[in-house]
Image (cartoon, grey):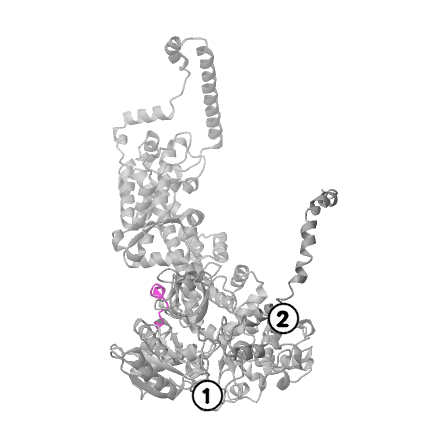
């Protein structure tokens, strides 16, 4: 049960109401997963998404930890005699961890030196130093000061009136007489007399204990020393007597007569106080401790440091040895402007012992508040002492503590940004576009350059393996050997890794196939963690009879077919996510990566009958034991529907509720089990389809089957309605992109043709933080800088692109050695007019340039129907739903009969094809013949030209008459 203050705090932070927040907590406590709550319970949670639900759960854990700490603090404070109920109420209502510690600090046991001073009875001396003046005395003092100011002004006016008519010489002689008006030497005269009478008071002995304490504190905290050194400007003037602002530069204390007289009663050798200097030093310790324990003052200094603090970096090594951290050596930025990725980079540099960091705050921003915390209307003779106490307390007791809190906040901010990026990068890898269930061949290259091939069928099973020794074979010889293997097994594509050696081997394979006119494409896939998998326990169990090189080739091919299933076989930390994973805590990293995996699987779902075992083991909302039990039952063929999983007790009720919608069972007798709808939505889905005039079997997946339905008629929220319409129109659609074979350009393409603005297709071969590298067919990969990825701000390129994805980019600079591309303002691909035809200017959908299937030109028996531009229609909706069957157009022939060209084409393809078969095919021949036939008719148009030439001079005469009214 969540406490009411936590509910109210979270509802305020997430801008929602308390009942919605209470509903989220109830569902989380019931064992429901965040993906389920974010997708199917948005009506109860105030439209919270999955990401918001996870943030709420994490924030609740933090507040519950704060609640446990609050209980400890309250138990400790309640044992103190005389504690006020107001102090306890402040602790009970506090919802900030730093503020809670600030409220508890005044009731902690003080430091030994402070406690010793209090035991000696010097607390009363500290009270006398900060004791305010009586009101009568204060009013009298103010009247005296006003009279003195008036006298000074009158003297100045009289002096100006007397000196005006005189010459400069007489004015110089008589000016001392005009300056005589009396000033009572109250403070300075008494100070001089006290210094003469008491020679011991001239020595700044009272400063010695405080100075020693300051030195020890500065040696213990290097930051305080750095702050004191930086804040003491060389030309900074001391505070004047009129302006009581304490100076940032410490001043040596002088024992005045007033201080000596005040400390004399507290000198007691029996208690260890031998001189008035020792008594004053003890009182200063007590005053400094009181300033450091002021909870409101600590909170104020912390807020000011957050707002106006500055982070300065000091290099430890030479600039030449800084390497990639060179741009951090001169960083000096406000704390509120530092972004998470910059803080992560600074922490990385600190870990490598490249730089040191200092948090600075100008004392002028807070010194007035620190001085005011000791009281107002204090005696003027103690003002210098109190200013010095305020400065030293700020430097030694406030800034070090507050700086530690600020550093902790910056670390957490950097960790949160690092975890967010790692989760986004992992999600991008898992959602890499898939090639589909097509036969492919994976390739692995050895250290000698020899190649190992693994031929896979459409289900990813190994059908054949081969090894090719490259040696010094030329392209034609190697191409002939490769073509023989490819024609024997009929793969649709060759999958090679993204590593350096694999990429070089892929270029060699591409050149060899080009030499023998083979059009089997070479596709690049992400090989992160492949070696770890091939040599791990899981690969030894799955591919026990296969050597390691063939295992690597198999995983390359499977990563082309279905990347998610293969990446989940590898520990997420081994997928080269980034250096940030070495800076955050292992527990937080594991939590963030597990949440990213669960979110990606919930987003895609899985075809339960054919999904890899690794996907089922990582389904959201399942414990490892339940997931393993479910996978074993699936492998044994004992599950035929979603309801059977519930009836057989394979999962608990909460687990079944969380995971049922993410399991698509295509062999189920229930048609809705093939969709991503939850079983609790089946009744509503049937009602919708019956209202549209059809049954589930007839209408499910048919375009336009839900046409005419209105959400208001069924009282369904907007989010649920959107999900229903999508699933009923495209049941079981895979939301991932469909990878395709790009239209590479030739390596010997004329640079003149690589003009700015031309659109190219390629495969992402590598992604870094600053950009991505694209294989467009040339020897050297093109590059997309991070600034050209999108029109919005992109923090890291790895959040948008993944290795192996096919992309279309626009040329920015084609004349440089490495072509520069851009993803901004890339025009949409052109669609071809006919059902088959060329793919010029368009995106080729799944499959190679040759006929899909076995050898060139042999049609496949199970070939899927194609639509416009070669688009392949899938039942699961990955490439769209089919609207044509067998070439017949649904809804009857077009209007206008057979005279209209199909699909609105403006030319007759049959005439063009017949003209192309003639021996002399000249597209301009008919045009010139037409002109020749019309050649004898030029006399007719020439006849009227003569009168036009004669009437030409008459036109200007008529123009003024017609244009005059207009003008």
Which mark identifies residue 858? 1
Q: Where in the figure is residue 298, as x and y percent of width and height?
A: 42, 48
**Residue 695 makes an appearance in the image:** yes
| For residue 1, side relative to residue 319 (left or right) | right
Looking at the image, tell me whether mark 1 or mark 2 is earlier in sequence order.
2
Asked whether residue 576 is drawn in magenta, I would say yes
The residue at 31%/80% (across/down) is: 476
The answer to whether residue 929 is above or below residue 519 is above
Residue assigned mark 2 = 717
Q: Quadrant of the C terminus?
A: top right
The answer to whether residue 119 is above or below residue 896 is above
Please provide the residue range marked out in magenta: 574-583
Among the 4 quarters of the image, the one containing residue 713: bottom right
Q: Where in the figure is residue 906, as x and y percent of width and height?
A: 61, 72
Nearest the eye: 735 or 764: 764
- How many dots with numbers? 2
Judged from the image, the secondary structure of the residue bearing numbered disc 1 is loop
Which mark identifies residue 46? none
How far apart are the alpha carbons under marks 1 and 2? 51 Å
Among the 4 quarters of the image, the one containing residue 228: top left
Asked whether residue 923 is drawn in magenta, I would say no
Nearest the eye: 946 or 129: 946
Among the 4 quarters of the image, the one containing residue 118: top left
Q: Where in the figure is residue 662, as x and y percent of width and height?
A: 51, 79
The residue at 47%/19% (across/down) is: 153
Nearest the eye: 507 or 292: 507
Nearest the eye: 494 or 842: 842
Label 1: how many Cα within 10 Å (few below 14, some 14–19, many 20+): few
């Amino acid at each position: 049960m969540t406490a009411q203050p936590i509910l109210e705090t979270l509802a305020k932070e997430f801008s929602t109401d308390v009942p919605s927040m209470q509903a989220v907590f109830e569902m989380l406590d019931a064992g429901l997963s965040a993906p389920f709550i974010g997708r199917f319970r948005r009506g109860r949670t105030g439209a919270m998404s999955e990401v918001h639900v996870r943030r709420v759960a994490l924030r609740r854990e933090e507040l519950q930890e704060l609640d446990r700490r609050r209980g400890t603090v309250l138990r400790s404070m309640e044992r103190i005699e005389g504690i006020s109920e107001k102090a306890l109420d402040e602790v009970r209502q506090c919802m900030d961890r730093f503020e809670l510690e600030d409220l508890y600090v005044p009731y902690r046991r003080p430091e030994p030196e402070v406690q010793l001073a209090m035991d000696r009875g010097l607390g009363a001396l500290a009270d006398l130093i900060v004791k305010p003046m009586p009101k009568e005395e204060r009013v009298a003092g103010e009247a005296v000061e006003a009279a003195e100011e008036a006298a000074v002004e009158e003297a100045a006016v009289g002096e100006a009136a007397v000196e005006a008519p005189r010459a400069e010489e007489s004015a110089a002689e008589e000016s001392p007489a005009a300056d005589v008006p009396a000033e009572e030497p109250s403070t300075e005269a008494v100070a001089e007399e006290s210094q003469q009478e008491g020679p011991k008071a001239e020595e700044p002995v009272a400063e010695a204990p405080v100075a020693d304490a300051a030195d020890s504190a500065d040696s213990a905290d290097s930051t305080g020393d750095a702050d004191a050194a930086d804040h003491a400007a060389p030309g900074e003037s001391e505070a004047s007597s009129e302006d009581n602002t304490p100076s940032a530069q410490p001043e040596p204390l002088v024992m005045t007569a007033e201080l000596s007289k005040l400390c004399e009663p507290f000198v007691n050798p029996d208690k260890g106080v031998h001189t008035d200097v020792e008594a004053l030093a003890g009182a200063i310790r007590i005053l400094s401790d009181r300033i450091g324990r002021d909870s409101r003052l600590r909170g104020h200094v912390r807020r000011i440091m957050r707002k106006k603090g500055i982070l300065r970096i000091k290099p430890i090594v030479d600039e030449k040895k800084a390497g990639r951290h060179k741009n951090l050596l001169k960083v000096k930025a406000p704390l509120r402007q530092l972004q998470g990725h910059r803080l992560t980079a600074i922490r990385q540099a600190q870990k490598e012992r490249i730089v040191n960091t200092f948090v600075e705050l100008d004392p002028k921003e807070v010194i007035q508040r620190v001085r005011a915390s000791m009281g107002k209307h204090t005696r003027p003779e103690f003002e210098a002492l109190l200013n010095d106490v305020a400065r030293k307390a700020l430097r030694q007791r406030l800034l070090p503590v507050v700086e530690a809190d600020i550093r902790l906040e910056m670390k957490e901010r950097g960790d949160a940004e690092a975890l967010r990026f790692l989760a986004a990068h992992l999600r991008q890898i898992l959602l890499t576009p898939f090639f589909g269930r097509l036969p492919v061949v994976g390739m692995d290259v050895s250290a000698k350059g020899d190649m190992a091939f693994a031929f896979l069928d459409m289900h990813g099973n190994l059908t054949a393996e081969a090894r090719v020794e490259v040696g010094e074979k030329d392209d034609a010889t190697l191409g002939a050997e490769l073509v023989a293997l490819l024609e024997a097994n009929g793969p649709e594509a060759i999958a090679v890794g993204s590593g350096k050696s694999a990429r070089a081997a892929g270029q060699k394979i591409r050149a060899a196939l080009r030499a023998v006119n083979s059009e089997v494409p070479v596709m690049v896939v992400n090989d992160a963690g492949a070696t770890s998998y091939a040599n791990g326990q899981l690969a030894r169990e799955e591919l026990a009879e296969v050597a390691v090189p063939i295992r690597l080739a198999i995983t390359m091919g499977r990563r082309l077919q279905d990347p998610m299933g293969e990446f989940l076989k590898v520990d997420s930390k081994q997928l080269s996510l980034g250096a940030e994973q070495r800076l955050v805590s292992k527990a937080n990293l594991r939590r963030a990566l597990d949440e990213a995996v669960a979110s990606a699987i919930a987003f895609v779902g899985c075809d339960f009958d054919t999904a890899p075992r690794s996907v089922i083991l990582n389904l959201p909302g399942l414990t490892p034991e339940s997931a393993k039990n479910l996978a074993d039952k699936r492998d044994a063929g004992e599950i035929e529907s979603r309801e059977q999983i519930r009836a057989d007790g394979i999962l608990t009720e909460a687990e079944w509720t969380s995971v049922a919608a993410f399991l698509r069972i295509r062999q189920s007798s229930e048609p809705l089990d093939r969709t991503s709808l939850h079983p609790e939505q089946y009744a509503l889905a049937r009602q919708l389809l019956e209202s549209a005039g059809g049954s589930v079997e007839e209408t499910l997946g048919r375009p336009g089957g839900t046409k005419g339905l209105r959400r208001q008629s069924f009282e369904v929220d907007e989010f649920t309605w959107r999900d229903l319409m999508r699933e009923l129109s495209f049941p079981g659609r895979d939301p991932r992109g469909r990878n395709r074979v790009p239209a590479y350009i030739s390596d010997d393409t004329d640079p003149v043709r690589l003009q700015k603005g031309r659109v190219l297709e390629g495969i992402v071969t590598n992604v870094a933080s600053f950009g991505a590298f694209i294989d467009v067919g040339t020897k050297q990969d093109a590059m997309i800088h991070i600034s050209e990825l999108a029109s919005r701000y992109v923090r890291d390129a790895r959040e948008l692109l993944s290795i192996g994805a096919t992309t279309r980019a626009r040329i920015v600079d084609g004349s440089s050695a490495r072509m520069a591309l851009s993803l901004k303002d890339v025009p949409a691909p052109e669609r071809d007019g006919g059902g088959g035809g060329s793919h010029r200017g368009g995106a080729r959908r799944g499959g190679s340039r040759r006929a899909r299937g076995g050898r060139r030109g042999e049609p496949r028996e199970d070939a899927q129907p194609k639509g416009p531009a070669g688009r392949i229609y899938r039942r699961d909706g990955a490439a769209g739903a089919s609207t044509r069957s067998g070439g017949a157009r649904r809804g009857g022939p077009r209007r206008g009969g057979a005279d209209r060209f199909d699909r609105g084409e403006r030319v007759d393809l049959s005439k063009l094809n017949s003209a192309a078969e003639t021996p002399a095919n000249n597209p301009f021949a008919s045009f010139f013949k037409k002109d020749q036939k019309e050649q004898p008719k030029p006399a007719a148009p020439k006849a009227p030209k003569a009168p036009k030439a004669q009437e030409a001079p008459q036109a200007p005469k008529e123009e003024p008459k017609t244009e005059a009214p207009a003008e």
